[in-house]
Image: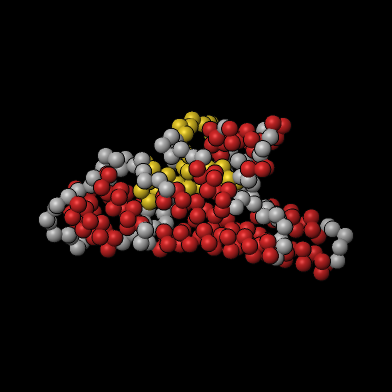
Amino acid sequence: MLKERINEQEIKTIFNSISSKKMYLKKMYLSKNITLKIPNKNKDLDNAIINTWDYDISKEIIRSLYKNTDKYIHSKRSYNLLKKRIKEWNDLKLGKIEWPFSPMAFDSHIRSINSMTISSKEKDQLIIDEVIRFRRIKEINTLRNDYIEYLIVENNDNIIPTLKHNKGIDFYIEGIPYDQKVSRSPTKKFIEDFKDINYKTYAIKNKNKVAEYLYKYQDSERFGYNNRLLVVYLDQDVTDKDIERCFKEVDFSKPIHLNFTYDLKGSKKEYQTNCYVILLYTREKVE
C-alpha cells in the first residue's frame, strides 16, 4: 500500500520514463533538503525512490508531474472534443446516441437485415448508416471516459495517477490501486431482475447491488476481482453536464467493500474486493 511504502512494481506502474523518475527525485530532494546526487541508472533511481518515499509529499509531486504528460493533456482536451463530436452527431441528425447493434451479435444482426423485405441497396445503406453511428458512439464514449478520468484526478487530491496508460491500474485512491472499467449497462441480468421496479432508479439507490452484478456476471474470459472504479451507463445520451453531476454523487473517501460469488467453469468461489461505482444518466429519465 502506497501510504506505507512503494516497491519496484509500483514504480514501474506509475512512472513512464527515466527522466520522470529523475524529475520526481529532484523535487523530492528539494522538498526534504536531501543533498545526495540523483542517480543515472534505472535500478539506482528505483532504490532512491523507495528509500525516500513519503506518501503525502510523493503524491503531490507525482500529481504535478502528471499535469505535464500527454495522458493528462489529452484527457483535459477531451471535454471540448466531446462537445464537438456530440454537436456533429446532432447536426447529422443521427437520432439518439444509442448502439445500433451489439458487436457480439453482429452476425445475427446481419441475418435479421437480410431477412427484411427491402432491396439489397437499401440493406447496404442501412448497414452503412449503422456502422457510421457505431463508430461515432465509440469515439464519443472514449472521449467521455477520458473526460471522466480527468475529472476523477483533477478534483480528488487523494488520488495518485499513473503517468502512462497501464493495463489493470489507472490510479491509486488513498494509496490503493484501482482499474477504471466502463460498462454499457449494469448487465442484462440486472435489467431483467429489476425491470418491474424501474431498474435505473433502483441502481441509483443501490450502487452496491450494481457492483455485485458487474463482478458476479462478468465474462469468464475476462474474469477478475481486482479493485475497480466502475463507470456504468444507465443512459447512452449523457452530456458533459450529466457526467459532472453524476461524478459529484461519488464519495471517493468511501469505497464499496464487496463480497461476491463467482461460478468459474462450474466451480463456485467467494471473492472480496473494493470498488467505486459512477452511474451515468440523464436526470429527467429517472425522475
**Residue 237 vs residue 75: left or right?**
right
Q: Residue furthest left?
A: 35
Position of the C terminus by quadrant: top right
Taking depth in this image into account, of 188 and 38 the one nearest to the observer is 38
Identify the residue at horizontal 49%, vertical 40% (top origin).
250
| Res 45 visible | no
Coordinates of residue 216 in the picture (x, y in percent): 55, 36
Q: At 68% from the left edge and 61% from the top edge, which residue is drawn?
A: 90
Residue depicted at x 19% and y 48%: 51
Which quadrant is the N terminus positioned in? top left
**Does residue 19 appear left or right of residue 222 in this picture?**
left
Is 157 situated left or right of 98 in this image? Answer: left
Which x, y percent locates residue 286?
66, 39
Q: How is the image coloured?
A: secondary structure
* Coordinates of residue 24 in the picture (x, y in percent): 25, 56
* Image point (67%, 33%), residue name: 194
Residue 32 in view in this figure: yes
Q: Which residue occupies the foreground of this view, 20 or 93?
A: 93
Residue 225 place in picture, x, y as percent: 47, 39
